[in-house]
Amino acid sequence: MSVPALHLRPAWALLKRHHQKVRRLHLRQLFAKDGKRGERLVVEAAGIYFDYSKNRITDETMELLLQLARESGLQDRIDAMFRGDRINTSEKRAVLHVALRAPRGASILFDGQNVVPEVHAVLDKMAEFSQRVRSGAWKGHTGKRIRSVVNIGIGGSDLGPVMAYEALKHYAERSMTFRFVSNVDATDFAEAVHGLDPEETLFIVSSKTFTTLETMTNAHTARDWLLSGLKGDSAAIAKHFVAVSTNAQEVAKFGIDTANMFGFWDWVGGRYSMDSAIGLSTMLAIGPDNFAAMLEGFHEIDEHFRTAPFERNLPVLMALLAVWYNNFFGAQTVAVLPYEQYLKRFPAYLQQLTMESNGKHVTADGADVNYDTGPIYWGEPGANGQHSFYQLIHQGTRLIPCDFIAFARTANPLGRHQDMLLANVFAQTEALAFGKTEKQVKAEGTPDWLLPHRLFEGNRPSNTLLLEALTPAALGKLVALYEHSVFVQGTIWQIDSFDQWGVELGKALAQRIIPELESAADPELEHDSSTNALIRRYRKLKRSGP
Ligand code: G6Q
Protein backbone atom coordinates (compact mmCIF):
# COMPACT_ATOMS: atom_id res chain seq x y z
CA MET A 1 0.00 0.00 0.00
CA SER A 2 1.42 3.37 -0.87
CA VAL A 3 0.99 5.88 1.91
CA PRO A 4 0.39 9.53 1.06
CA ALA A 5 2.73 12.19 2.42
CA LEU A 6 1.90 13.17 5.97
CA HIS A 7 0.18 16.46 5.15
CA LEU A 8 -1.97 14.69 2.54
CA ARG A 9 -3.41 12.17 4.96
CA PRO A 10 -6.98 13.22 5.86
CA ALA A 11 -6.36 12.74 9.59
CA TRP A 12 -3.52 15.25 9.48
CA ALA A 13 -5.77 18.13 8.39
CA LEU A 14 -8.48 17.00 10.78
CA LEU A 15 -5.99 16.93 13.65
CA LYS A 16 -4.78 20.42 12.77
CA ARG A 17 -8.31 21.77 12.94
CA HIS A 18 -9.06 19.75 16.05
CA HIS A 19 -5.95 21.06 17.75
CA GLN A 20 -7.17 24.63 17.30
CA LYS A 21 -10.36 23.61 19.04
CA VAL A 22 -8.85 21.80 22.01
CA ARG A 23 -5.49 23.41 22.57
CA ARG A 24 -6.78 25.74 25.27
CA LEU A 25 -8.78 23.10 27.11
CA HIS A 26 -7.43 22.60 30.59
CA LEU A 27 -6.95 19.24 32.23
CA ARG A 28 -8.98 20.66 35.13
CA GLN A 29 -11.99 20.99 32.82
CA LEU A 30 -11.43 17.61 31.20
CA PHE A 31 -11.31 15.86 34.56
CA ALA A 32 -14.24 17.86 35.94
CA LYS A 33 -16.39 16.91 32.95
CA ASP A 34 -15.68 13.19 33.24
CA GLY A 35 -15.42 11.80 36.73
CA LYS A 36 -14.11 8.51 35.36
CA ARG A 37 -11.45 9.93 33.05
CA GLY A 38 -8.63 8.65 35.24
CA GLU A 39 -10.00 5.11 35.02
CA ARG A 40 -11.10 5.30 31.41
CA LEU A 41 -7.96 6.58 29.74
CA VAL A 42 -5.90 3.72 31.01
CA VAL A 43 -4.58 0.59 29.33
CA GLU A 44 -3.25 -2.40 31.16
CA ALA A 45 -1.16 -4.91 29.27
CA ALA A 46 1.73 -7.25 29.98
CA GLY A 47 1.74 -6.15 33.61
CA ILE A 48 2.07 -2.46 32.75
CA TYR A 49 -0.56 -0.02 33.96
CA PHE A 50 -0.45 2.88 31.52
CA ASP A 51 -2.38 5.95 32.59
CA TYR A 52 -2.61 8.50 29.81
CA SER A 53 -5.54 10.43 31.23
CA LYS A 54 -3.37 13.42 32.20
CA ASN A 55 -2.80 14.29 28.55
CA ARG A 56 -4.35 17.23 26.73
CA ILE A 57 -6.63 15.05 24.69
CA THR A 58 -10.31 14.36 24.23
CA ASP A 59 -11.87 11.17 22.92
CA GLU A 60 -11.95 12.84 19.52
CA THR A 61 -8.20 13.50 19.71
CA MET A 62 -7.56 9.83 20.23
CA GLU A 63 -9.91 8.82 17.42
CA LEU A 64 -8.13 11.15 15.04
CA LEU A 65 -4.67 10.02 16.14
CA LEU A 66 -5.73 6.41 15.65
CA GLN A 67 -7.06 7.34 12.23
CA LEU A 68 -3.66 8.87 11.48
CA ALA A 69 -1.99 5.61 12.51
CA ARG A 70 -4.24 3.67 10.14
CA GLU A 71 -3.75 6.13 7.29
CA SER A 72 0.01 5.83 7.84
CA GLY A 73 -0.19 2.14 7.00
CA LEU A 74 0.98 1.20 10.47
CA GLN A 75 -0.37 -2.34 10.46
CA ASP A 76 1.38 -3.05 7.16
CA ARG A 77 4.63 -1.68 8.54
CA ILE A 78 4.36 -3.78 11.69
CA ASP A 79 3.70 -6.85 9.57
CA ALA A 80 6.62 -5.95 7.29
CA MET A 81 8.99 -5.68 10.23
CA PHE A 82 7.96 -9.03 11.72
CA ARG A 83 8.09 -10.58 8.26
CA GLY A 84 11.75 -9.63 7.84
CA ASP A 85 11.23 -7.16 4.99
CA ARG A 86 14.14 -4.81 4.42
CA ILE A 87 12.40 -1.87 6.04
CA ASN A 88 15.74 -0.20 6.79
CA THR A 89 15.73 0.98 3.20
CA SER A 90 18.77 3.24 3.15
CA GLU A 91 20.93 0.33 4.36
CA LYS A 92 18.83 -2.32 2.60
CA ARG A 93 18.53 -4.30 5.81
CA ALA A 94 15.82 -6.16 7.62
CA VAL A 95 14.96 -5.05 11.14
CA LEU A 96 14.45 -8.15 13.18
CA HIS A 97 15.34 -7.40 16.79
CA VAL A 98 12.03 -9.08 17.61
CA ALA A 99 13.65 -12.37 16.56
CA LEU A 100 16.25 -11.95 19.32
CA ARG A 101 13.60 -12.69 21.90
CA ALA A 102 11.38 -15.10 20.02
CA PRO A 103 10.91 -18.26 22.07
CA ARG A 104 12.64 -21.45 21.05
CA GLY A 105 10.49 -23.17 18.49
CA ALA A 106 9.06 -19.96 17.03
CA SER A 107 9.63 -19.15 13.40
CA ILE A 108 10.74 -15.79 12.03
CA LEU A 109 11.93 -15.84 8.48
CA PHE A 110 14.67 -13.81 6.89
CA ASP A 111 15.36 -14.52 3.23
CA GLY A 112 13.28 -17.67 3.58
CA GLN A 113 15.35 -19.00 6.52
CA ASN A 114 14.03 -19.35 10.05
CA VAL A 115 16.49 -17.31 12.16
CA VAL A 116 15.14 -18.35 15.56
CA PRO A 117 17.27 -21.54 15.83
CA GLU A 118 20.43 -19.48 15.15
CA VAL A 119 19.39 -16.96 17.79
CA HIS A 120 18.98 -19.73 20.34
CA ALA A 121 22.23 -21.37 19.35
CA VAL A 122 24.03 -18.12 20.25
CA LEU A 123 22.00 -17.75 23.45
CA ASP A 124 22.96 -21.29 24.42
CA LYS A 125 26.61 -20.60 23.74
CA MET A 126 26.40 -17.42 25.81
CA ALA A 127 24.69 -19.33 28.62
CA GLU A 128 27.31 -22.04 28.65
CA PHE A 129 30.12 -19.52 28.67
CA SER A 130 28.43 -17.41 31.36
CA GLN A 131 28.00 -20.43 33.56
CA ARG A 132 31.62 -21.40 33.20
CA VAL A 133 32.81 -17.92 34.09
CA ARG A 134 30.35 -17.46 36.95
CA SER A 135 31.14 -20.85 38.45
CA GLY A 136 34.88 -20.35 38.18
CA ALA A 137 35.30 -23.25 35.73
CA TRP A 138 36.68 -20.81 33.15
CA LYS A 139 40.17 -19.93 34.31
CA GLY A 140 42.41 -17.06 33.38
CA HIS A 141 45.87 -17.65 31.91
CA THR A 142 47.49 -18.13 35.30
CA GLY A 143 44.78 -20.46 36.55
CA LYS A 144 42.83 -17.93 38.59
CA ARG A 145 39.09 -17.54 38.18
CA ILE A 146 37.62 -14.45 36.54
CA ARG A 147 36.37 -11.87 38.98
CA SER A 148 36.12 -8.77 36.80
CA VAL A 149 34.47 -8.29 33.46
CA VAL A 150 35.12 -5.21 31.33
CA ASN A 151 32.88 -4.57 28.34
CA ILE A 152 34.54 -2.51 25.64
CA GLY A 153 32.10 -1.02 23.16
CA ILE A 154 30.44 2.25 22.23
CA GLY A 155 27.01 3.50 21.18
CA GLY A 156 24.68 0.56 20.77
CA SER A 157 27.42 -1.76 21.96
CA ASP A 158 27.71 0.08 25.26
CA LEU A 159 24.59 2.01 26.25
CA GLY A 160 22.33 -1.05 26.44
CA PRO A 161 24.82 -3.17 28.41
CA VAL A 162 25.56 -0.34 30.86
CA MET A 163 21.89 0.47 31.33
CA ALA A 164 20.90 -3.17 31.78
CA TYR A 165 23.71 -3.83 34.26
CA GLU A 166 22.70 -0.83 36.35
CA ALA A 167 19.00 -1.66 36.06
CA LEU A 168 19.46 -5.27 37.12
CA LYS A 169 22.28 -4.84 39.61
CA HIS A 170 20.07 -6.30 42.30
CA TYR A 171 20.13 -9.57 40.32
CA ALA A 172 23.85 -9.41 39.58
CA GLU A 173 26.54 -11.69 40.92
CA ARG A 174 27.94 -9.37 43.55
CA SER A 175 31.21 -11.22 43.98
CA MET A 176 32.14 -10.09 40.49
CA THR A 177 32.98 -6.60 39.25
CA PHE A 178 31.51 -5.25 36.02
CA ARG A 179 32.93 -2.22 34.28
CA PHE A 180 32.30 -0.57 30.93
CA VAL A 181 34.65 1.36 28.66
CA SER A 182 33.34 3.33 25.72
CA ASN A 183 35.07 6.67 25.35
CA VAL A 184 38.32 7.03 23.43
CA ASP A 185 39.28 9.42 26.23
CA ALA A 186 41.96 7.34 27.98
CA THR A 187 40.52 8.31 31.34
CA ASP A 188 37.59 6.00 30.66
CA PHE A 189 39.90 3.02 30.21
CA ALA A 190 42.22 3.98 33.05
CA GLU A 191 39.35 4.30 35.51
CA ALA A 192 37.65 1.13 34.29
CA VAL A 193 40.68 -1.02 35.02
CA HIS A 194 41.71 0.86 38.13
CA GLY A 195 42.31 -1.64 40.89
CA LEU A 196 41.66 -4.67 38.67
CA ASP A 197 43.97 -7.65 38.57
CA PRO A 198 44.82 -8.68 34.98
CA GLU A 199 44.99 -12.31 36.07
CA GLU A 200 41.30 -12.18 37.01
CA THR A 201 39.98 -9.85 34.30
CA LEU A 202 37.96 -10.74 31.23
CA PHE A 203 37.49 -8.24 28.42
CA ILE A 204 34.47 -8.46 26.15
CA VAL A 205 35.15 -6.55 22.96
CA SER A 206 31.66 -5.72 21.76
CA SER A 207 31.53 -4.35 18.28
CA LYS A 208 29.21 -5.31 15.48
CA THR A 209 31.67 -4.16 12.83
CA PHE A 210 34.88 -4.66 14.85
CA THR A 211 36.27 -1.57 13.12
CA THR A 212 34.94 1.21 15.35
CA LEU A 213 37.78 3.60 16.17
CA GLU A 214 37.01 4.10 19.86
CA THR A 215 36.38 0.42 20.56
CA MET A 216 39.39 -0.85 18.67
CA THR A 217 41.64 1.74 20.31
CA ASN A 218 40.39 0.68 23.74
CA ALA A 219 40.67 -3.01 22.83
CA HIS A 220 44.33 -2.58 21.86
CA THR A 221 45.02 -0.63 25.02
CA ALA A 222 43.33 -3.42 26.98
CA ARG A 223 45.54 -5.99 25.29
CA ASP A 224 48.65 -4.00 26.22
CA TRP A 225 47.40 -3.61 29.79
CA LEU A 226 46.73 -7.32 30.08
CA LEU A 227 49.97 -8.44 28.51
CA SER A 228 52.05 -6.08 30.59
CA GLY A 229 50.32 -7.48 33.68
CA LEU A 230 50.94 -11.05 32.54
CA LYS A 231 54.56 -10.69 31.54
CA GLY A 232 53.88 -10.34 27.81
CA ASP A 233 52.63 -13.86 27.20
CA SER A 234 50.31 -13.45 24.21
CA ALA A 235 48.83 -16.91 24.81
CA ALA A 236 46.91 -15.15 27.60
CA ILE A 237 44.68 -13.36 25.08
CA ALA A 238 42.57 -16.45 24.49
CA LYS A 239 41.67 -16.70 28.17
CA HIS A 240 41.06 -13.00 28.80
CA PHE A 241 39.41 -11.72 25.63
CA VAL A 242 36.16 -12.67 23.98
CA ALA A 243 34.41 -10.87 21.17
CA VAL A 244 30.84 -10.03 20.32
CA SER A 245 30.67 -9.21 16.65
CA THR A 246 29.37 -9.97 13.19
CA ASN A 247 32.88 -9.70 11.72
CA ALA A 248 34.79 -12.96 12.32
CA GLN A 249 37.66 -11.89 10.07
CA GLU A 250 38.49 -8.78 12.09
CA VAL A 251 38.03 -10.67 15.36
CA ALA A 252 40.61 -13.24 14.25
CA LYS A 253 42.94 -10.48 13.08
CA PHE A 254 42.85 -8.95 16.55
CA GLY A 255 43.99 -12.28 17.95
CA ILE A 256 40.78 -13.47 19.54
CA ASP A 257 39.99 -17.12 18.89
CA THR A 258 36.73 -17.14 16.90
CA ALA A 259 35.63 -20.03 19.10
CA ASN A 260 35.32 -17.30 21.73
CA MET A 261 33.27 -15.07 19.51
CA PHE A 262 29.55 -14.58 20.00
CA GLY A 263 27.82 -13.63 16.80
CA PHE A 264 24.83 -11.66 15.78
CA TRP A 265 23.43 -10.51 12.51
CA ASP A 266 23.13 -7.71 10.05
CA TRP A 267 19.43 -7.45 10.82
CA VAL A 268 20.14 -6.32 14.39
CA GLY A 269 20.73 -2.57 14.61
CA GLY A 270 23.30 -1.40 17.18
CA ARG A 271 20.79 0.45 19.35
CA TYR A 272 18.41 -2.51 19.14
CA SER A 273 21.00 -5.05 20.23
CA MET A 274 21.12 -5.18 24.03
CA ASP A 275 19.19 -8.46 23.95
CA SER A 276 21.57 -10.04 21.41
CA ALA A 277 25.08 -11.28 22.21
CA ILE A 278 25.84 -7.61 22.90
CA GLY A 279 24.14 -8.43 26.19
CA LEU A 280 26.87 -10.93 27.13
CA SER A 281 28.01 -8.73 30.02
CA THR A 282 24.39 -8.59 31.20
CA MET A 283 24.14 -12.37 31.11
CA LEU A 284 27.44 -12.75 32.93
CA ALA A 285 26.15 -10.41 35.61
CA ILE A 286 22.60 -11.71 36.12
CA GLY A 287 22.95 -15.29 34.87
CA PRO A 288 21.26 -17.07 31.96
CA ASP A 289 17.92 -17.61 33.71
CA ASN A 290 17.41 -13.95 34.49
CA PHE A 291 18.54 -13.08 30.98
CA ALA A 292 15.92 -15.47 29.62
CA ALA A 293 13.30 -13.80 31.82
CA MET A 294 14.31 -10.45 30.36
CA LEU A 295 13.85 -11.83 26.84
CA GLU A 296 10.41 -13.11 27.80
CA GLY A 297 9.49 -9.61 28.91
CA PHE A 298 10.62 -8.23 25.56
CA HIS A 299 8.65 -10.90 23.75
CA GLU A 300 5.49 -10.25 25.70
CA ILE A 301 5.47 -6.64 24.48
CA ASP A 302 6.38 -7.73 20.94
CA GLU A 303 3.31 -9.92 20.88
CA HIS A 304 1.18 -7.21 22.41
CA PHE A 305 2.47 -4.73 19.81
CA ARG A 306 1.87 -7.15 16.97
CA THR A 307 -1.64 -8.21 17.96
CA ALA A 308 -3.39 -5.66 20.20
CA PRO A 309 -5.84 -3.30 18.54
CA PHE A 310 -4.29 0.13 18.21
CA GLU A 311 -6.62 1.72 20.78
CA ARG A 312 -5.27 -0.66 23.43
CA ASN A 313 -1.75 -0.96 22.10
CA LEU A 314 0.75 0.57 24.51
CA PRO A 315 3.58 1.42 22.09
CA VAL A 316 1.06 2.77 19.57
CA LEU A 317 -0.64 4.98 22.16
CA MET A 318 2.67 6.25 23.51
CA ALA A 319 3.84 7.07 20.00
CA LEU A 320 0.62 8.83 19.01
CA LEU A 321 0.76 11.00 22.11
CA ALA A 322 4.38 11.86 21.33
CA VAL A 323 3.34 12.85 17.79
CA TRP A 324 0.45 14.91 19.17
CA TYR A 325 2.74 17.09 21.27
CA ASN A 326 5.62 17.14 18.79
CA ASN A 327 3.65 18.05 15.70
CA PHE A 328 0.63 19.94 16.98
CA PHE A 329 1.74 21.61 20.22
CA GLY A 330 5.27 22.16 18.93
CA ALA A 331 6.80 20.50 22.00
CA GLN A 332 10.48 19.94 21.38
CA THR A 333 11.34 17.50 24.10
CA VAL A 334 10.04 14.57 26.12
CA ALA A 335 11.21 14.03 29.69
CA VAL A 336 11.58 10.44 30.89
CA LEU A 337 11.46 10.31 34.66
CA PRO A 338 12.01 6.90 36.23
CA TYR A 339 11.26 6.76 39.93
CA GLU A 340 13.65 3.87 40.39
CA GLN A 341 17.29 4.46 41.14
CA TYR A 342 18.34 1.34 39.26
CA LEU A 343 17.04 2.97 36.08
CA LYS A 344 19.50 5.82 36.33
CA ARG A 345 20.98 5.11 32.89
CA PHE A 346 17.62 4.48 31.24
CA PRO A 347 17.19 8.05 29.96
CA ALA A 348 20.70 7.97 28.46
CA TYR A 349 19.91 4.66 26.80
CA LEU A 350 16.65 6.07 25.45
CA GLN A 351 18.43 9.09 24.06
CA GLN A 352 20.23 6.93 21.56
CA LEU A 353 17.24 4.73 20.87
CA THR A 354 14.93 7.64 20.18
CA MET A 355 17.18 10.32 18.75
CA GLU A 356 19.47 8.20 16.59
CA SER A 357 16.36 6.49 15.26
CA ASN A 358 14.12 9.46 14.58
CA GLY A 359 16.48 12.41 14.25
CA LYS A 360 16.04 12.55 10.47
CA HIS A 361 15.11 15.40 8.13
CA VAL A 362 14.28 13.35 5.06
CA THR A 363 11.71 10.64 4.50
CA ALA A 364 12.74 7.11 3.63
CA ASP A 365 12.33 8.16 -0.01
CA GLY A 366 14.76 11.03 0.44
CA ALA A 367 12.22 13.87 0.37
CA ASP A 368 12.64 16.75 2.81
CA VAL A 369 10.08 16.57 5.57
CA ASN A 370 7.99 19.67 6.19
CA TYR A 371 7.19 18.78 9.77
CA ASP A 372 9.18 18.12 12.91
CA THR A 373 10.42 14.58 13.48
CA GLY A 374 12.05 13.05 16.57
CA PRO A 375 11.81 15.11 19.74
CA ILE A 376 14.69 15.41 22.18
CA TYR A 377 14.50 12.80 24.93
CA TRP A 378 16.07 13.53 28.27
CA GLY A 379 15.63 12.79 31.93
CA GLU A 380 16.98 11.72 35.26
CA PRO A 381 15.68 9.52 38.03
CA GLY A 382 12.75 11.13 39.78
CA ALA A 383 12.96 12.77 43.15
CA ASN A 384 16.45 14.06 42.29
CA GLY A 385 15.10 15.84 39.22
CA GLN A 386 12.41 17.46 41.36
CA HIS A 387 15.10 19.42 43.15
CA SER A 388 16.64 20.58 39.93
CA PHE A 389 14.98 20.91 36.52
CA TYR A 390 11.33 20.22 37.40
CA GLN A 391 10.97 23.96 38.10
CA LEU A 392 11.06 24.56 34.36
CA ILE A 393 8.53 21.81 33.68
CA HIS A 394 6.13 23.28 36.24
CA GLN A 395 6.52 26.99 35.65
CA GLY A 396 8.68 27.50 32.55
CA THR A 397 7.46 28.69 29.18
CA ARG A 398 7.91 25.39 27.37
CA LEU A 399 5.57 22.47 27.14
CA ILE A 400 7.37 19.30 28.18
CA PRO A 401 5.38 16.09 28.07
CA CYS A 402 6.69 13.67 30.67
CA ASP A 403 6.78 9.90 31.06
CA PHE A 404 6.73 8.94 34.72
CA ILE A 405 7.89 5.37 35.33
CA ALA A 406 7.24 3.84 38.72
CA PHE A 407 7.20 0.49 40.46
CA ALA A 408 5.01 -0.62 43.33
CA ARG A 409 7.71 -2.74 44.94
CA THR A 410 11.36 -2.03 45.49
CA ALA A 411 14.21 -4.48 45.75
CA ASN A 412 15.36 -2.54 48.80
CA PRO A 413 12.42 -2.10 51.14
CA LEU A 414 13.67 0.22 53.82
CA GLY A 415 11.34 1.98 56.21
CA ARG A 416 8.98 4.42 54.51
CA HIS A 417 11.16 5.12 51.47
CA GLN A 418 8.97 3.48 48.85
CA ASP A 419 5.75 5.15 49.95
CA MET A 420 7.54 8.48 49.96
CA LEU A 421 8.97 7.85 46.51
CA LEU A 422 5.61 6.88 45.04
CA ALA A 423 3.89 9.78 46.80
CA ASN A 424 6.25 12.00 44.84
CA VAL A 425 5.32 10.39 41.53
CA PHE A 426 1.63 10.90 42.09
CA ALA A 427 2.11 14.39 43.53
CA GLN A 428 4.18 15.50 40.57
CA THR A 429 1.77 14.31 37.90
CA GLU A 430 -1.11 15.85 39.88
CA ALA A 431 0.70 19.16 40.29
CA LEU A 432 1.71 19.25 36.63
CA ALA A 433 -1.83 18.56 35.44
CA PHE A 434 -3.87 20.66 37.82
CA GLY A 435 -1.47 23.28 39.09
CA LYS A 436 -2.62 25.78 41.65
CA THR A 437 -5.10 28.54 40.90
CA GLU A 438 -5.00 32.14 42.04
CA LYS A 439 -7.90 31.42 44.36
CA GLN A 440 -6.01 28.58 46.02
CA VAL A 441 -2.83 30.57 46.37
CA LYS A 442 -4.73 33.56 47.82
CA ALA A 443 -6.56 31.33 50.26
CA GLU A 444 -3.18 30.37 51.68
CA GLY A 445 -2.68 33.99 52.65
CA THR A 446 -0.10 34.73 49.94
CA PRO A 447 0.46 38.47 49.58
CA ASP A 448 -0.55 39.93 46.22
CA TRP A 449 2.99 40.76 45.13
CA LEU A 450 4.00 37.12 45.48
CA LEU A 451 0.95 35.69 43.71
CA PRO A 452 2.38 35.46 40.16
CA HIS A 453 5.38 33.51 41.45
CA ARG A 454 3.32 31.03 43.37
CA LEU A 455 0.78 30.30 40.67
CA PHE A 456 0.93 26.97 38.87
CA GLU A 457 -0.85 27.07 35.54
CA GLY A 458 -1.01 23.30 35.36
CA ASN A 459 -2.11 21.67 32.11
CA ARG A 460 1.32 20.07 31.82
CA PRO A 461 0.77 16.63 30.31
CA SER A 462 2.20 13.35 31.52
CA ASN A 463 1.95 9.60 31.12
CA THR A 464 2.32 7.33 34.12
CA LEU A 465 3.67 3.82 33.68
CA LEU A 466 3.15 1.80 36.82
CA LEU A 467 4.65 -1.68 37.10
CA GLU A 468 4.93 -4.16 39.91
CA ALA A 469 8.69 -4.32 40.31
CA LEU A 470 11.83 -3.78 38.27
CA THR A 471 12.51 -7.41 37.41
CA PRO A 472 14.49 -8.62 34.37
CA ALA A 473 11.15 -9.21 32.61
CA ALA A 474 9.95 -5.71 33.46
CA LEU A 475 13.12 -4.22 32.01
CA GLY A 476 12.60 -6.16 28.79
CA LYS A 477 9.05 -4.88 28.61
CA LEU A 478 10.04 -1.26 29.11
CA VAL A 479 12.74 -1.37 26.47
CA ALA A 480 10.48 -3.10 23.95
CA LEU A 481 7.79 -0.54 24.65
CA TYR A 482 10.05 2.34 23.71
CA GLU A 483 11.59 0.47 20.76
CA HIS A 484 8.18 -0.01 19.22
CA SER A 485 6.99 3.46 20.09
CA VAL A 486 10.00 4.84 18.21
CA PHE A 487 9.08 2.67 15.22
CA VAL A 488 5.48 3.87 15.23
CA GLN A 489 6.58 7.50 15.35
CA GLY A 490 9.01 6.89 12.49
CA THR A 491 6.23 5.22 10.51
CA ILE A 492 3.97 8.24 10.87
CA TRP A 493 6.80 10.56 9.82
CA GLN A 494 7.77 8.13 7.02
CA ILE A 495 11.41 8.13 8.03
CA ASP A 496 13.92 5.29 8.26
CA SER A 497 14.22 4.79 12.02
CA PHE A 498 16.96 2.22 11.60
CA ASP A 499 19.83 3.98 9.84
CA GLN A 500 22.21 6.55 11.36
CA TRP A 501 24.02 8.35 8.58
CA GLY A 502 24.23 11.44 10.76
CA VAL A 503 27.09 9.94 12.76
CA GLU A 504 29.30 9.37 9.69
CA LEU A 505 30.58 12.84 8.81
CA GLY A 506 32.22 13.56 12.17
CA LYS A 507 33.87 10.11 12.12
CA ALA A 508 35.37 10.70 8.67
CA LEU A 509 36.64 14.17 9.56
CA ALA A 510 38.27 12.87 12.75
CA GLN A 511 40.19 10.30 10.70
CA ARG A 512 41.58 13.13 8.60
CA ILE A 513 42.49 15.26 11.63
CA ILE A 514 44.25 12.55 13.69
CA PRO A 515 47.45 12.61 11.58
CA GLU A 516 47.38 16.40 11.63
CA LEU A 517 47.54 16.31 15.40
CA GLU A 518 50.17 13.58 15.54
CA SER A 519 52.59 14.61 12.81
CA ALA A 520 55.97 15.81 14.02
CA ALA A 521 56.24 18.51 11.36
CA ASP A 522 53.65 21.28 11.15
CA PRO A 523 50.99 19.97 8.77
CA GLU A 524 49.48 21.82 5.82
CA LEU A 525 45.99 22.56 7.07
CA GLU A 526 43.14 22.96 4.67
CA HIS A 527 40.15 23.26 6.96
CA ASP A 528 38.19 26.43 7.65
CA SER A 529 40.03 29.14 9.60
CA SER A 530 38.44 28.18 12.92
CA THR A 531 39.34 24.49 12.67
CA ASN A 532 42.86 25.32 11.42
CA ALA A 533 43.43 27.68 14.35
CA LEU A 534 42.13 25.16 16.88
CA ILE A 535 44.43 22.46 15.53
CA ARG A 536 47.44 24.81 15.69
CA ARG A 537 46.57 25.92 19.19
CA TYR A 538 46.25 22.31 20.35
CA ARG A 539 49.60 21.35 18.83
CA LYS A 540 51.22 24.30 20.58
CA LEU A 541 49.58 23.60 23.93
CA LYS A 542 50.53 19.95 23.94
CA ARG A 543 54.15 20.82 23.16
CA SER A 544 54.26 23.28 26.03
CA GLY A 545 52.99 20.71 28.56
CA PRO A 546 55.08 19.24 31.38
C1 G6Q B 1 23.56 2.18 16.73
C2 G6Q B 1 24.69 2.63 15.97
C3 G6Q B 1 25.95 2.85 16.76
C4 G6Q B 1 26.81 1.62 16.94
C5 G6Q B 1 28.20 2.07 17.40
C6 G6Q B 1 29.11 0.91 17.65
O1 G6Q B 1 22.49 1.89 16.27
O2 G6Q B 1 24.86 1.81 14.89
O3 G6Q B 1 25.73 3.43 18.02
O4 G6Q B 1 26.23 0.74 17.84
O5 G6Q B 1 28.75 2.93 16.45
O6 G6Q B 1 29.27 0.16 16.50
P1 G6Q B 1 30.00 -1.23 16.53
O7 G6Q B 1 29.19 -2.15 17.36
O8 G6Q B 1 30.11 -1.66 15.10
O9 G6Q B 1 31.35 -1.00 17.16
Image (spheres, helix red, strand yellow):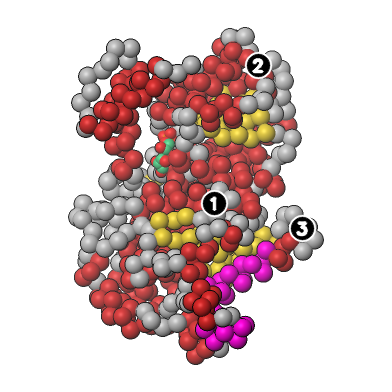
> Mark 1: is the Cβ under 8 angstroms from ligand 1?
no
Q: Nearer the viewer, residue 109 or 429?
A: 429
Label 2 belongs to which residue? 141
Q: Which percent across, then down, holds residue 448?
A: 52, 82
Left or right, 50 with respect to 284, comes to left
**Mark 3 vs mark 2: which is more N-terminal?**
2
Depicted 457 relative to depicted 133: above or below: below
Depicted 236 relative to depicted 172: above or below: above
- The local crowd at label 3, few if under 14, some if 14 to 19, many if 20 or more residues have their Cα within 10 Å, is few
Left or right, 396 with respect to 103, comes to left
**Mark 2 vs mark 1: which is more N-terminal?**
2
Number of numbered discs visible in the structure rendering: 3
Residue contact between numbered discs 3 and 2, judged by CB atoms under 8 Å: no
The quarter holding residue 427 reads bottom right
**Residue pictured at 30% horizontal, 21% vertical:** 516
Depicted 304 relative to depicted 267: above or below: below
Magenta stretch in the rendered image: 421-445
Left or right, 13 with respect to 392, comes to left
Q: Which percent across, then down, holds residue 121?
A: 54, 38
Report, in whole angstroms, how far the alpha carbon at label 1 lies from the one at label 3: 22 Å
Report, in whole angstroms, how far the alpha carbon at label 3 lies from the one at label 2: 42 Å
Q: What kind of residue is marked 1? A: Phe
Q: Dot 2: what SS?
A: loop
Q: What kind of residue is marked 3? A: Pro
Q: Nearer the viewer, residue 186 or 265?
A: 186
The picture quadrant for ligand 1 comes to top left
**Residue pictured at 28% horizontal, 48% vertical:** 89
Label 1 belongs to which residue? 346
Label 3 belongs to which residue? 413
Q: Nearer the viewer, mark 2 or mark 1?
A: 1
